[in-house]
Image: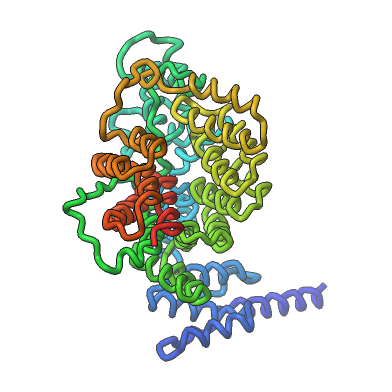
């Protein structure tokens, strides 16, 4: 036995020596490429990973620094991670910074970063912890799964007892002891953050025990119309994924005030692509950084890949950098590169917006089966599933995957409220027509007419206004003349955010018409619209026909 104990002691001693942190490397005079080569040659070289993390942090590459420290932590050792106190502190600080960026766009993964930083010994403010938990609660409450929504209610009930709770007490509606009025106020708040299914259920609880009028009744009627698919209530505005990232719609200046730089028209496709990618979510890289990648992509795509990797490394949240590049390549018309970047974003932070971006990028590559898998995941977490099904279905329809587009349309029609039902039916009609199912098309068209909002169906204008974009486009298609082109021009000036009339003008105006430059400038502005579908359509239109 004594012999055995001696051997165990020797083994323990060897193990203890094996986990001793390697001496730090002086990186003052080291080249980053030398450290990268060393890491590639020996992926388990802890000393090289730590040195690369230190150097990356000094060079303003926090994403790379955090990635290297995560590798060291994963490698571990028999008695713990083989790093120094300053390495641990560096990682904790980077995690806190990344959590702040993720909270800004409402990402539930912020809480994992906060918990990780606390486990490393960092002090985190109570407000930041509560805000991170709130992001998780909202994500759970937006989900279609009942158990996840119940978990979201439990987190919200916990937050309702904190000083950081809602001033009006709306979150108290998540508590088991909530009053009918608190259920109603919670329902209003849930609708505002995009948790439509849970909002309807909370408002339904209020309705069972209360028949009062006022804002809660209005909210109930809106939610009930969405749940039942009825068009009896005015259509609700679509709720964006990250309200903090949405600003007022950019106004397009009047034609007389527009000043178009000489290089804008030549660079319009890449400028629009960079603007679109920058506007997709809070915390995206700057438009200038994305524009640099887009410019290089036009000259040499391989070099653009290297610039893109540098851009990602310079973000404390690499997932956000990958997502912005995915959006950039979407707008540049490179679905293969977009798919790679969106997949990296989802791997880093599986947020609904990133999963939706991946589903759409996969659909553009023609891989319909995989697109439907990710569309299902994104739709379940979106809050209003029809939005995702329609967007992915539109992409599948555009690449000729008509059967799969019809699958998306079927799910969208089943789940859509009155605000999304017309778009869902339009998708179903387009896919059915492409498949030659004329009987089905006629039945869907009847349903489409019935889905029109009441104010549009009950009060049609016998004589549309001269500046009405839809009427101007119809007049041009009926009789394409200089006069109907001028009518579309007037309509475009009167409606700064109308995309369709600008797309029609882009196709109608001769290449040497001076108004064409103004239309392209308008589309560049619209590429940064808060509505991602409008922004991408504007960017792709410039890329296809704007030059």
Which residue sits at x=62%, y=70%? Answer: 75
In the rendered view, how is the structure colored?
A: rainbow
- State the residue in front, 238 or 347: 238
Quarter occupied by residue 444: top right
| Residue 97, visible in the rendered structure | no
- State the residue in front, 177 or 495: 495
- Image quarter hosting the N terminus: bottom right
Residue placed furthest toward the left: 257
Which residue sits at x=55%, y=28%? Answer: 415
Quarter occupied by residue 28: bottom left
The vertical placement of 201 against 536, above or below, is: above
Residue placed furthest toward the bottom: 29
Q: Position of residue 207 (x, y in %)?
A: 43, 13
Q: Position of residue 454 (x, y in %)?
A: 39, 18
Which residue sits at x=42%, y=47%? Answer: 532
Quarter occupied by residue 89: bottom left
| Residue 491, visible in the rendered structure | yes
- Image quarter hosting the C terminus: bottom left
The vertical placement of 382 against 126, above or below, is: above
Count of numbered circles in the view: 0
- State the residue in front, 319 or 386: 386
Which residue sits at x=28%, y=32%? Answer: 167
Q: Position of residue 113 (x, y in %)?
A: 47, 56
- State the residue in front, 376 or 207: 376
The vertical placement of 33 against 322, above or below, is: below
Q: Position of residue 394 (x, y in %)?
A: 54, 42
């Amino acid at each position: 036995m004594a012999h055995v104990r001696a051997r165990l002691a020797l083994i323990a001693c060897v193990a203890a020596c094996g986990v001793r942190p390697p001496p730090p490397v002086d990186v003052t005079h080291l080249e980053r490429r030398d450290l990268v080569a060393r890491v590639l040659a020996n992926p388990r070289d802890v000393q090289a990973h730590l040195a690369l993390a230190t150097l990356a942090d000094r060079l303003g590459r926090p994403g790379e620094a955090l990635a290297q420290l995560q590798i060291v932590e994963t490698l571990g050792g028999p008695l713990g991670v083989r790093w120094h106190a300053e390495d641990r502190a560096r990682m904790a600080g980077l995690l806190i910074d990344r959590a702040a960026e993720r909270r800004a766009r409402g990402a539930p993964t912020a809480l994992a970063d906060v918990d990780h930083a606390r486990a490393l010994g960092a002090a985190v403010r109570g407000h930041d912890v509560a805000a991170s938990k709130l992001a998780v609660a909202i994500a759970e409450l937006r989900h279609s799964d009942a158990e996840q929504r119940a978990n979201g209610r439990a987190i919200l009930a916990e937050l309702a007892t904190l000083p950081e709770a809602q001033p009006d007490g709306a979150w108290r509606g998540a508590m088991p002891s909530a009053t009918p009025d608190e259920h109603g106020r919670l329902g209003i708040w849930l609708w505002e953050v995009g948790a439509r299914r849970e909002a309807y259920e909370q408002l339904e609880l209020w309705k069972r025990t209360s028949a009062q009028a006022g804002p809660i009744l209005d909210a109930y009627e809106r939610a009930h119309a969405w749940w039942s698919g009825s068009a009896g209530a005015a259509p609700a505005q679509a709720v964006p994924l990250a309200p903090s990232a949405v600003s007022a719609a950019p106004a397009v200046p009047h034609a007389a005030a527009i000043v178009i730089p000489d290089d804008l028209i030549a660079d319009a496709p890449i400028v629009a692509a960079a603007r679109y990618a920058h506007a997709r979510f809070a915390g995206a890289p700057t438009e200038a950084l994305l524009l640099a990648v887009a410019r290089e992509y036009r000259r040499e795509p391989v070099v653009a890949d290297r610039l893109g990797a540098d851009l990602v490394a310079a973000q404390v949240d690499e997932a956000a950098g990958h997502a912005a590049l995915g959006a950039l390549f979407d707008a540049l018309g490179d679905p293969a590169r977009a798919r790679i970047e969106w997949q990296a974003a989802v791997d880093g932070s599986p947020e609904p917006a990133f999963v939706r971006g991946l589903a759409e990028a996969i659909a553009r590559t023609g891989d319909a089966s995989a697109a439907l898998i990710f569309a299902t995941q994104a739709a379940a977490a979106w809050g209003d599933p029809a939005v995702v099904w329609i967007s992915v279905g539109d992409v599948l329809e555009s690449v000729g995957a008509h059967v799969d587009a019809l699958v998306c349309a079927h799910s969208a029609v089943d789940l859509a409220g009155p605000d999304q039902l017309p778009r869902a039916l339009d998708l179903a009609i387009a896919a059915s027509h492409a498949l030659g199912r004329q009987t089905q098309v006629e039945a869907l068209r009847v349903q489409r007419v019935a889905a029109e909002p009441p104010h549009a169906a009950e009060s049609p204008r016998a004589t549309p206004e001269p500046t009405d974009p839809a009427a101007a486009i119809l007049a041009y298609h009926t009789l394409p003349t200089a006069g109907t082109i001028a009518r579309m021009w007037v309509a475009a000036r009167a409606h700064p955010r109308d995309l369709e009339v600008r797309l029609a003008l882009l196709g109608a105006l001769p290449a040497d018409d001076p108004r064409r430059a103004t239309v392209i400038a308008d589309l560049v502005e619209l590429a940064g619209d808060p509505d991602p579908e409008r922004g991408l359509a504007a960017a792709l239109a410039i890329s296809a026909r704007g030059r």
